[in-house]
Amino acid sequence: MKAWTIRKPGGREELQMKEKEMPAVREGEIRIKVKAAGINRTDTLTRQNTNLKAPYPILGVEVSGIVVDNHSNSPHLSEGTRVAGLVNHGGYAEFVSMPADRAIVIPDNLSFEEAAAIPEVFLTAYQTLYWLGELKDKETVLIHAAGSGVGTAAIQLARQLSNATVIATAGQSEKLDRAKSLGASAVVNYKKDSFDQVVQDQTEGRGVDVILDFVGASYWDMNLASCALDARWVLIGTLGGAKIDSLSIGQLMMKRLSLKGTVLTPRSDDYKARLTHEFSKRALPLFNEGKLKPVIHSVIPFKNLPEAHRQMEENENIGKIILSIEEESV
Amino acid sequence: MKAWTIRKPGGREELQMKEKEMPAVREGEIRIKVKAAGINRTDTLTRQNTNLKAPYPILGVEVSGIVVDNHSNSPHLSEGTRVAGLVNHGGYAEFVSMPADRAIVIPDNLSFEEAAAIPEVFLTAYQTLYWLGELKDKETVLIHAAGSGVGTAAIQLARQLSNATVIATAGQSEKLDRAKSLGASAVVNYKKDSFDQVVQDQTEGRGVDVILDFVGASYWDMNLASCALDARWVLIGTLGGAKIDSLSIGQLMMKRLSLKGTVLTPRSDDYKARLTHEFSKRALPLFNEGKLKPVIHSVIPFKNLPEAHRQMEENENIGKIILSIEEESV
């Protein structure tokens, strides 16, 4: 089968399509004929990582496709079932295997490209909002990087599952317009305005209950000022730096804040299975009803992977960049 | 009735026993004839606080005693029932009222002095270990200020409710001996040794799952180094300063840490009622069986309150300082 790997760690010029062996499928796993794969920042970071152990893996951590072998005891995953989900690696390929308990059965109304746009960003957004952020009905949430894949997913989940009030920040007017159309009730262009002031105005001085923070250091003081009593502040990225110059424990205590760091990719198989299960139960019906929508920036043919990585690395996207694996494109 | 208040904000010399009106008892409340009251740091801080609104309240936030009026619909709190619990203020008095849903029915084998030593420290320890620390069976917990009221309660709860491995720190050998006798499996005299090294040795490099941090700034880097993956680090005091000079978000994320600030006293009535209810259900039977024990440093007659405050302010105590309100002592 055809698959994308790299000659050696480095830039996009190292990406190489190769003929590889079909992946093994173990007890409890399914093998999928891949139809589409999502591009993620972890892929471009893995591509550059010089510390990886040999042999270098096939890149790609999320796919959609058709079940071709079911070595699990799940009756819902018979051959021909349309599924999507997270794989540990090997997603940029014609075939891949994954633990059956991590498969999401694709709602009928979604294409393979749309389905491949769901797992990483919606599961991350779900984990961040609910498992870490403990978002409750009608609370207020501040979502930074509102144009990102996780940002666009989080705005929708917070609105549709929790009727939350969403305040979103981004640096481009198209991203802010999209955030509004997805349900944000207030948006802030961080290049023009201070979001903490908007938060104070929008919440009548109370602050927000949950922050999804992809930014880190450069927003630190404004995030702290934006927290309501008992707020949960979830750190999922450091686009604005990772080093904080000072921290007041007194404020953490008096505001009774929870500051939580997280990453999804290195979590255990069991964690991902539980997350997938809960997400499927709560959120998939809303995709079926059209209330939740995968946000796709571009669909790129399999053979043009370097272009997909370029879009990701240059932060061009609003929503997901999807690699499409049709027969003719391989 | 007799009650302790102050002439004006200030030192112990401002404490003044006065004749006060009996407290009102509202719907949903009980009135208690107080038999004993716990001394807490919040009392000495309130005594010094120049920002309090007039009129200055009767001090004291936890008591034990006998129900004399039941204005609630709880059949368990009839007149004559022995109860203990948190009050919003007014505990240093012959009578006090409290919400009925915050009353703990005292186990038969405990004296009033012992019962008054339970609410604040055991509820704080329970809240910190379970509601914030999410301590699970057989996890490892690092407890600083092991000789404090909350410390001695936390060691016992972690051992008895969760079979946890406890590593405890303190600065005096008597406090460390007491920590061991309460169930700590390793103790560290912070004046002699670095606790992070002991944590690494005791956990084979894995780190601890939960930290109860009363110390703050001066232990910051060692606490961070002591955290296992997915650790919960709960900030409940700043004995070692409140200002951190630098914070690495990268480590918070990679270790997937939760850093949570908390204070108990300003929490809502509803929160305290729920906490009291869950604590009573899980922990009170273990007091009955003698597996959990209030740790009492001293019992001081009602008229000698200034001496009780002195012991608290000079950190003399291992466990609780209790004010005893017998007829003859008033």
Image (tube, coloured by chain):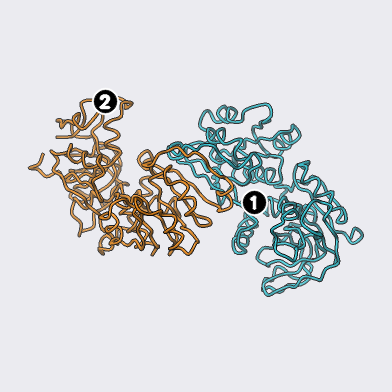
Chain colours: A cyan, B orange
Tell which subunit mark 2 falls on.
B
Q: Residue at x 44, y 43 (%)?
A: B261
Tell which subunit mark 1 falls on.
A
Q: Residue at x 36, y 45 (%)?
A: B272
Neighbour tally class for label 2: few under 14, some 14-19, many 20 plus, Cα within 10 Å: few
Q: Is A73 left or right of B42, judged from the image as shown? A: right
Which residue is situated farthest in the front direction here? B192
Helix or strand or loop: what does disc 1 sit on?
helix
Helix or strand or loop: what does disc 2 sit on?
loop
Residues indicated by labels 2 and 1 sit on the same polypeptide chain = no
User: In the rendered image, which quarter contains the N terminus of chain A?
Assistant: bottom right
Q: Nearer the viewer, residue B267 or A182?
A: B267
Q: Position of residue A29 (x, y in %)?
A: 70, 70
Tag 1 residue? A124
Q: Position of residue A234 (x, y in %)?
A: 57, 45
Q: Residue at x 42, y 38 (%)?
A: B242
Question: Does the image show residue A316?
Answer: yes
Q: Is B297 left or right of A272, judged from the image as shown? A: left
Q: CA distance from mark 2 to mark 1?
A: 52 Å
Q: Is B111 left or right of B228, judged from the image as shown? A: left
